[in-house]
Image: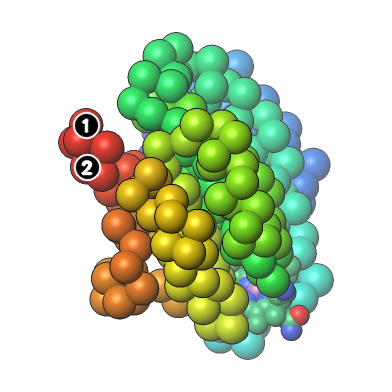
């Protein structure tokens, strides 16, 4: 294994072990060693949080491990995020997106990853955070002059609010003004189509591809 692979493996395990201090330090070490922040996120930390998710599903991990894994990912992203923006010198070139996790849902790791990747690939991103009310998405998209609204949902119960988002846009006569991209574990292409969204992305890279396509830049 190369030194880079070693570092990526350490990043991955820092999230699996829920060691936030180590995750943050490794992110700094990676940047100092010239590691591409995007690669650190995709092959290191994101791979780790996916594994945490699997361990949770298998009943090996419980809530404290989940929270520690999420916190580790967040601390690393706090170091890598600004480096991503710095590397995306032409940010904003492709369009402006507002992104958030939908009403009732506090899962924000995937949303943060998608936001970071959109930014890294040339979009200007306004992050509204988690548990974002449907009308707030729309108000902010209008105020920011956004081209794209990106809504994340991780719960089957909050998935329905993505549908409400599209409905509210119609009710407010704003449907044609914004492209709507949806995602999150319980969403899929068929769901996006059924609710009248413009696109779906199964992961952060697919989100970038879909966003580019929707804005005619793909
Ligand atoms: C970490 C986690 C938590 C953390 C969240 C920390 C945080 N800050 O986000 C904590 C511990 C707080 C948590 C809480 C809860 N959780 Co939780 N959680 C998870 C877990 C393990 C991982 C989610 C995650 O971050 N994955 C990693 C990221 C990178 O992947 P992702 O989110 O899927 O995002 C990717 C794609 O989906 C896509 N994507 C995501 N968003 C978007 C948006 C757009 C526009 C696009 C295009 C793409 C896109 O790209 C991302 C990058 O590749 C999942 C299990 C799982 N395997 O998903 C359960 C899970 C989502 N949680 C679950 C539950 C039930 C809860 C709770 C209700 C538990 C409880 N009883 O309190 C609460 C939720 C409270 C609330 N109101 O929201 C269930 C949901 C079940 C369901 N079907 O509804 C899951 C599936 C676990 C399970 N198998 O039971 N959780």
Q: Is label 1 in a helix, a strand or a loop? A: loop
The residue pinned by badge 2 equals 213
The residue at the point 76 percent across, 60 percent down is 68
The residue at the point 57 percent across, 26 percent down is 30
Q: Position of residue 111 (x, y in %)?
A: 55, 52
Asked if residue 44 shows in the view, the reply is no
Q: Position of residue 48 (x, y in %)?
A: 55, 56
Disc 1 vs disc 2: Cβ atoms closer than 8 Å? Answer: yes
Which quarter of the image is occupied by the C terminus? top left
Q: CA distance from mark 1 to mark 2?
A: 6 Å
Residue 217 — which label?
Answer: 1
> 138 or 184, which lies in front?
138
Which quarter of the image is occupied by the N terminus? top left
The residue at the point 22 percent across, 42 percent down is 213
Q: Decide if residue 122 is on the left or right side of residue 162.
A: left
Q: Compared with residue 47, is residue 148 higher up or lower down, i.e. above or below? A: above
> 186 or 99, which lies in front?
99
Q: Compared with residue 84, is residue 205 higher up or lower down, i.e. above or below? A: below
- If the picture is divided into quarters, which one holds ligand 1? bottom right
Residue 105 — which label?
Answer: none
Q: Is label 2 in a helix, a strand or a loop? A: helix
Q: Compared with residue 74, is residue 158 higher up or lower down, i.e. above or below? A: below
Could you say which quadrant of the image residue 215 lies in?
top left
> Outermost residue, bottom direction?
59
The residue at the point 32 percent across, 68 percent down is 196
Label 1, residues with CA under 10 Å away: few <14, some 14-19, many ≥20: few
Query: Does the numbered disc 2 mark a residue whose Cβ is under 8 Å from ligand 1?
Result: no
Asked if residue 152 shows in the view, the reply is yes
Label 2, residues with CA under 10 Å away: few <14, some 14-19, many ≥20: few
Q: Decide if residue 19 is on the left or right side of residue 84.
A: right
Query: Does the numbered disc 1 mark a residue whose Cβ is under 8 Å from ligand 1?
Result: no
């Amino acid at each position: 294994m190369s030194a880079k692979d070693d570092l990526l493996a350490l990043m991955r395990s820092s999230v699996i072990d829920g060691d936030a201090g180590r995750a943050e330090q490794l992110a700094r070490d990676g940047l100092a060693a010239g590691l591409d922040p995007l690669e650190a996120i995709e092959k290191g930390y994101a791979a780790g949080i996916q594994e945490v998710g699997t361990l949770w599903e298998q009943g090996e991990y419980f809530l404290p491990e989940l929270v520690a894994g999420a916190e580790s990912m967040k601390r690393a992203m706090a170091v890598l995020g600004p480096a991503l923006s710095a590397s995306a010198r032409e940010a904003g070139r492709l369009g402006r997106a507002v992104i958030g996790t939908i009403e009732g849902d506090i899962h924000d790791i995937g949303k943060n990853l998608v936001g970071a990747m959109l930014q890294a690939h040339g979009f200007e991103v306004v992050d509204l955070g988690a548990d974002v009310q449907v009308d707030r998405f729309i108000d902010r998209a209008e105020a920011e002059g956004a081209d794209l609204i990106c809504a994340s949902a991780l719960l089957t119960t909050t998935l329905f609010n993505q549908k409400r988002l599209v409905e509210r846009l119609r009710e407010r006569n704003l449907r044609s003004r914004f492209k709507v991209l949806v995602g999150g574990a319980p969403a899929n292409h068929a769901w996006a189509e059924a609710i009248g969204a413009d696109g779906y992305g199964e992961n952060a890279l697919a989100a970038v591809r879909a966003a580019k396509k929707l804005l005619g830049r793909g």
